[in-house]
Amino acid sequence: MEFIDTHCHFYLNDFDADRDEVLQACITANVNTLLLPNINRDSIEPMLKVCQSYPQHCFPMLGLHPSDVNNHYQEELNYILNQYDPKQYLAIGEVGIDLYWDRTYINQQIMAFRQQIEFAIKHDLPLIIHSRKSFTEILSVLNEYKQIKMRGIFHCFSGDVNQAKKVIEKGFYLGIGGTLTYKNSGIQEVVKQIPLSHLVLETDAPFLPPVPHRGKRNQSNYIPLIAEKISELKGISMEEIAQTTSFNAKSIFKL
């Protein structure tokens, strides 16, 4: 049985004190592959350092997080995309639109999102999409490219079943993480109704830990807790969840 964490920030300093121990815990939990999304220019170096330290387990992505977009985003984005090496990066992420805090830079976020979509299309890379309080805006931008086949993941999907179906129609998978284990989580109904063939597992570590670890640092070795909740909701075995979600991840990222 093998699990893949399709989204974790294992390079952040939250793990500096015990990164080796956490990775060993991941291996023990059969979470052998960790996929690392980028945030901004400053996160590239620590991300690559971690991937170089654990080359059999950690793999990097490239992108500008929407929360880091401001009036000077173009310079930041140019720097980041100029680092692209096809032998090194396996996706463009995480990218998208975040309107949770405010809408000050909504136009800049949309423009940055478009540029990174076009970069992903040009290099045949999957997109890892951050969509927070912005599903309508995200979908509107994706519709501009509806004649082009794309693939990727809606990271930390939090929409309803109808939105999930729209995501799947666009060629994307749903990233299911620790929020699934939260009481009265709306995502539980989505997981019940959407086939496993459209889901992948993620932690977003060190953020959004599953029950019973809420309030503590999240870790990739908690992936089986998410799989257990899916098993409970769908009435299927852990082995099937591991096999199918890992197959999905390998297909998206061409692993």
Image: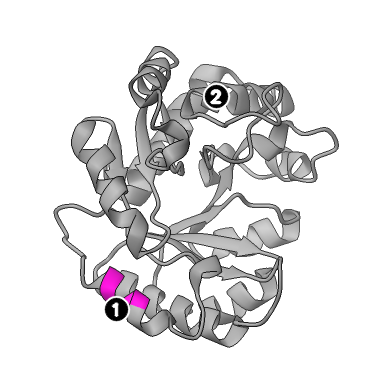
Q: Residue furthest top?
A: 28
Tell me if residue 182 can be seen. Answer: yes
Question: Circle 1: is it few (<14), some (14-19), or many (20+) Cα within 10 Å?
Answer: few
What percent of the width, then of the height, locates residue 227? Answer: 58, 26
Residue drawn 72% across and 31% down? 181
Residue 79 belongs to the span the image colors magenta: yes
**For residue 89, above or below residue 52:** below
Q: Which mark is residue 101?
A: none
Q: Position of residue 32 (x, y in %)?
A: 34, 25
Q: Nearer the viewer, mark 1 or mark 2?
A: 1
| 169, above or below 224, in the image | below
The amino acid type, in three-letter code, at marker 2 is: Tyr
Labelled disc at residue 222: 2
- Horizontally, residue 169 falls left or right of residue 100, namely left
Q: Are dots 1 and 2 in contact, CB under 8 Å? A: no
Q: In terms of image quadrants, where is residue 214?
A: top right
Residue beneath disc 1: 78
